[in-house]
Image (cartoon, rainbow, N blue to C red):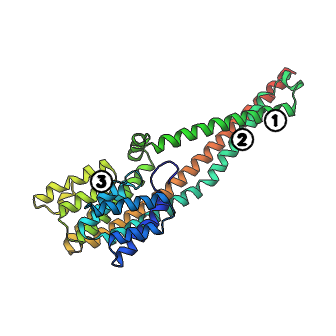
Amino acid sequence: MGLFSSRLSPGQMAPLCRQLATSYNAGIPILRGLELTAQHAASRKIKGMLGRMRNAIRNGATLQEAARAESELVPDFFVEVLGAGEAGGRLDEMLRDLADYYENLHAMRRSVLVSMVYPGLQLTAAWFLGTFALGLAGRFSLSDTRNFSVGDYFTQYAAFQARSMIVFALLFAVVVALSRLGLFNHLIAPIKEYVWPIRPITRRFGLARFFRGMSLLVGAGLDMRQCIQRSAKLTMNPRMERDLMRAVPVVANGGTLVEAFSKCTTLSRIAREMIAVGEVSGDLDGSMRKVAEWHFEEARAAVRTALTVMGILVLLLVGGIIGYIVISFYSGYFNMLDTI
């Protein structure tokens, strides 16, 4: 489970999807595949979830319906992809795509965490050294200097840091608890939609999922309106979904995809061009697969850009703290000299 969510983490979803994809691709029925996957699951919660899904399917539920009943554990994206795979008859490819997606997401999260180690150490050092130096600068007055005791100051500083760590731990515990209850979802959604550099990352990942879904569903011969409707849900972004759904009435009235997506502000220029090429060449699913790959690489580049910007901001913050410490220290020092 993730620290800030009760749902399975990408590191747990990746092997789960990979095992299901491997067994299904080998011709093993989905019920047997769920059973085999449960036998190799490391977590009792995953075993219980897969067992409940098997029972639901035996009672007549689809794989998507069985997964949706476990929405407290599995991500919404997983549920929607299963539904698209079942509808298009491409469940094996959808499961492989899910495994690749969660493996890439897990690797990306690990790289983000590794990239944040050095800025985190800088902020930690700035906090401890900064509070120590500012406290020392505050004691630089003539009356304090005469009675100054290094031992007493270190005792007071240690007590201050202990209180600070307790407050930080309590705040962190509250944030984790509220996050696992889903109370931050309404706050996170606007951040993903409007705040740079999060916005381009979420939009590019959403478009990558949309075009990958379109590629598989179009290749399966599904009705184009259903392809758009099901793929739009894969963006996991309500605003993008509404924008993409504007293409459905145009397609229903006999319009081309180029005409249908002409009013969609979500699509990039290269996406529109590749759709036009796919319609003319007759290789629409291949063109959309290439667009999906391009958007995924663009999303990874956006993540790297965000990490670079974050590192620069941390350096500027640490530099500002150091500058404030130096100014405060020498201000107290010269004030002390003036009183002599």
Q: Image point 62% across, 54% down: which residue?
A: 117
- Of tags 1 and 2, the one toward the viewer is 1
**Tag 3, which secondary structure?**
loop
**Is there any visible trace of residue 12 in the rendered image?**
yes
Which residue type does callout 1 highlight?
Phe
| Mark number displayed over residue 319 | none
Sequence-first tag of 1 and 3: 1
Please name the residue shown 41% across and 58% down the image: 49
**Residue that carries the numbered disc 2 in the rendered image:** 128
| SS for callout 1 | helix
Residue 268 in sight: no
Q: Residue at x 55, y 60 (%)?
A: 111
Of circles 3 and 2, the one toward us is: 2
Q: Give amino acid for label 3.
A: Thr
On screen, 22 above or below 38? below
In the displayed orientation, state which residue is furthest to the left: 253
Report whether 293 appears left or right of 247: right
Coordinates of residue 180 in the picture (x, y in percent): 47, 45
Mark 1 surroundings within 10 Å by alpha-carbon count, few (fewer than 14), some (14 through 19), many (20 or more) = few
User: Would you say 289 lies left or right of 19 here?
Assistant: left
Query: Which quadrant would residue 79 be assigned to in this image?
Result: bottom left
In this rendering, position of residue 1 left or right of residue 218? right
Amino acid type for the residue under numbered disc 2: Phe
The residue pinned by badge 3 equals: 266
Q: Nearer the viewer, residue 249 or 166?
A: 166
Classify mark 2: helix, strand or loop. helix
Give the residue pinned by disc 1. Answer: 154
